[in-house]
Every structure is written in structure tokens, then in C-alpha cells.
Image (tube, rainbow, N blue to C red):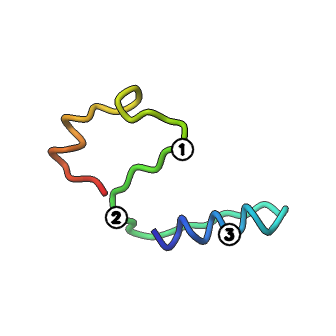
Amino acid sequence: MEQLHLEEALLRTNSQNWCIIHQNPLDAIVMGISTRPEQVLDLDIIQQKKFP
């Protein structure tokens, strides 16, 4: 989550290009605010794997 916060801060405050590399990240699914999970994800698999 810390990396996502850093990426959002850079996007909002800086017009330069950035490449952020995080070694050994935890599994996570990040979607836009208008995305409906049931349309783009297999929710049964997601619930079994317990993604955050």
C-alpha cells in the first residue's frame, strides 16, 4: 500500500516520468474507482486466494 501512496503522490504533484520498482511485493489487486470487480475478476478465485 505504501508504494501505491507514493505513486499517487508523484502523479498528482510531479509531471516528470517515474519508474518505481518494488522487490518482492505482496499480492494485490488495484483497480480504478469506476471498475466493477464482477466484470473484470473471477471473484471465486479471488476469495479463495484472499487478496487484499
Check if mark 1's residue and mark 3's residue have beta carbons within 8 Å.
no
Q: Residue at x 49, y 73 (%)?
A: 2
> Horizontally, is 15 left or right of 35 in the view?
right
Location of residue 45 in the rendering, given as x and y in whole percent from the top left corner = 20, 38
> Horizontally, is 28 left or right of 9 in the view?
left
Location of residue 16 in the rendering, given as x and y in whole percent from the top left corner = 83, 63
Location of residue 6 in the rendering, given as x and y in whole percent from the top left corner = 61, 71
In the rendered image, which residue does mark 1 sit on? Answer: 33
Disc nearer the start of the sequence (1/2): 2
Q: Residue at x 41, y 30 (%)?
A: 40
In the rendered image, the quadrant that contains the C terminus is bottom left
Of the two numbered discs 1 and 2 in the rendering, the one whose residue sits closer to the viewer: 1
In the rendered image, which residue does mark 2 sit on? Answer: 26
Q: Nearer the viewer, residue 14 or 19?
A: 14
Mark linked to residue 44: none
Disc nearer the start of the sequence (2/3): 3
Determine whether the residue tagged by mark 2 lies in a helix, strand or loop.
loop
Of the two numbered discs 1 and 3 in the rendering, the one whose residue sits closer to the viewer: 1
In the rendered image, which residue does mark 3 sit on? Answer: 9
Location of residue 27 in the rendering, given as x and y in whole percent from the top left corner = 33, 57
Of the two numbered discs 2 and 3 in the rendering, the one whose residue sits closer to the viewer: 3
